[in-house]
């Protein structure tokens, strides 16, 4: 279970990275156009930004194609209707009960110690 | 060689539409970017005046820049849809949810079982502590201020009395109240955790 959820989290992180890269693509395009609008353009910067734009676009395309290919392989017929919310809530409450019992026991232990000292 | 999986048509169509959207958006970005750079080139010979050509180029660049931004936003929407599809339809994750549920329930049952055992143990110890405490300070107590043990014993006696002993029978049993009283504490001791359990 941990393996599956970890792999899924990795995929979601990869998709988030792709989102950030798309923003970087737009930023690169804006930088190139801004540089073109100047009277004296810096060619090196222009080439660098244009190359970065092209590389990022190709990388995003490759990554998204890989994600779609993976989904084609693992997609189920029906979307799942299960949820682990109720069981996790019950477990959380059980752990809170344990913490409360521990707190009360520590109070009793402290009281006993005080009685013994007195 | 992996065999092609047979998906429901809706899922297949959906994934194909994702693929198409990806291709279209990437193509739109690259084309518009390339055209902007080409348009930035200043040409000596133009069919219209320089000012008009400049205005036209300006408008074209605005439109192409907007197209690049629209394609970028469409890609962001596509990524969001892919995330949703992954969460809802990833088969290994769906299996993992059931296992996760089982693990959480097992942990909860174990916690409750241990708390119940702890409760039983603490109630036994508490009973013994109360007995020791009240017996040690019994000389300082008032007549009406009964210890917890004696209050339970009184309750047991009253319960036994109300349970079916009629008045004549009660009167006939009065001489034997002594043995009853000595038996009642033993009964309470035997069911020591009982009262606290009911509490």
Image: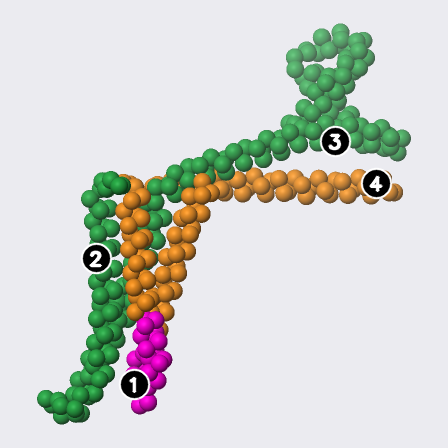
Measured in 3D between alpha carbons, the distance from the residue under mark 2 to the one under mark 1, in whole angstroms, is: 34 Å
Between disc 4 and disc 2, the foreground one is 2
Provide the letter of the chain coloured orange: A
SS of the residue under disc 1? helix
Q: Which residue is mark 3?
A: B126
Chain for disc number 1: A
Q: Which residues are magenta?
A: A28-53
Q: Which residue is mark 1?
A: A37
Chain for disc number 3: B
| Residue B188 part of the magenta-drawn span | no
**Mark 3 neighbour class, 10 Å CA radius: few under 14, some 14 to 19, many 20 or more:** some
User: Where B95 falls versus B178 (above or below)?
Assistant: below
Measured in 3D between alpha carbons, the distance from the residue under mark 4 to the one under mark 1, in whole angstroms, is: 84 Å
Between disc 4 and disc 1, the foreground one is 1
Chain for disc number 2: B
Provide the letter of the chain coloured green: B
Q: Are marks 4 and 3 on the same chain?
A: no
Please say if the residues under marks 4 and 2 sit with CB atoms less than 8 Å apart.
no
Q: Which residue is mark 4?
A: A115
Between disc 2 and disc 3, the foreground one is 2
Query: Nearest the camera: A55 or B131?
Result: A55
Measured in 3D between alpha carbons, the distance from the residue under mark 4 to the one under mark 3, in whole angstroms, is: 15 Å
User: Where B19 falls versus B153 (above or below)?
Assistant: below
Query: Nearest the camera: B176 or B135?
Result: B135
Magenta: main secondary structure equals: helix
Q: Which residue is mark 2?
A: B20
Residue B106 relative to residue B174: left or right: left
Quadrant position of residue B114 = top right
């Amino acid at each position: 279970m941990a393996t599956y959820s970890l792999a899924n989290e990795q995929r979601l992180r990869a998709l988030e990275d792709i989102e950030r890269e798309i923003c970087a693509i737009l930023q690169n395009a804006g930088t190139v156009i801004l540089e073109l609008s100047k009277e004296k353009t810096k060619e090196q910067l222009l080439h660098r930004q244009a190359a970065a734009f092209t590389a990022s676009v190709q990388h995003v395309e490759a990554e998204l194609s890989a994600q779609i290919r993976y989904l084609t392989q693992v997609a189920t017929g029906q979307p799942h209707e299960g949820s682990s919310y109720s069981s996790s809530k019950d477990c959380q409450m059980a752990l809170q009960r344990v913490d409360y019992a521990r707190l009360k026991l520590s109070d009793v232990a402290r009281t006993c110690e005080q009685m013994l000292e007195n | 060689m992996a065999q092609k999986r047979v998906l429901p048509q809706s899922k297949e169509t959906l994934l194909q539409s994702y693929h198409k959207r990806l291709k279209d958006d990437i193509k739109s970005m690259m084309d518009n970017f390339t055209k902007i750079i080409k348009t930035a080139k200043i040409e000596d010979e133009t069919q219209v005046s320089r000012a008009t050509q400049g205005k036209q180029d300006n408008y074209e660049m605005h439109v192409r820049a907007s197209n690049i931004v629209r394609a970028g936003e469409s890609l962001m929407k596509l990524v969001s849809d892919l995330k949703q599809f992954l969460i809802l339809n990833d088969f290994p994750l769906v299996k993992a949810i059931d296992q996760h549920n089982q693990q959480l329930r097992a942990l909860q049952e174990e916690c409750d079982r241990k708390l119940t055992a702890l409760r039983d143990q603490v109630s036994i110890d508490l009973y013994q502590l109360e007995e020791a405490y009240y017996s040690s300070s019994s000389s300082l107590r008032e007549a009406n201020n009964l210890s917890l043990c004696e209050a339970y014993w009184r309750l047991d006696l009253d319960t036994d009395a109300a349970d079916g002993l009629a008045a004549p029978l009660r009167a006939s049993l009065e001489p034997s109240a002594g043995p009853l009283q000595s038996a009642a504490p033993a009964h309470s001791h035997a069911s020591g955790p009982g009262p606290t359990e009911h509490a």
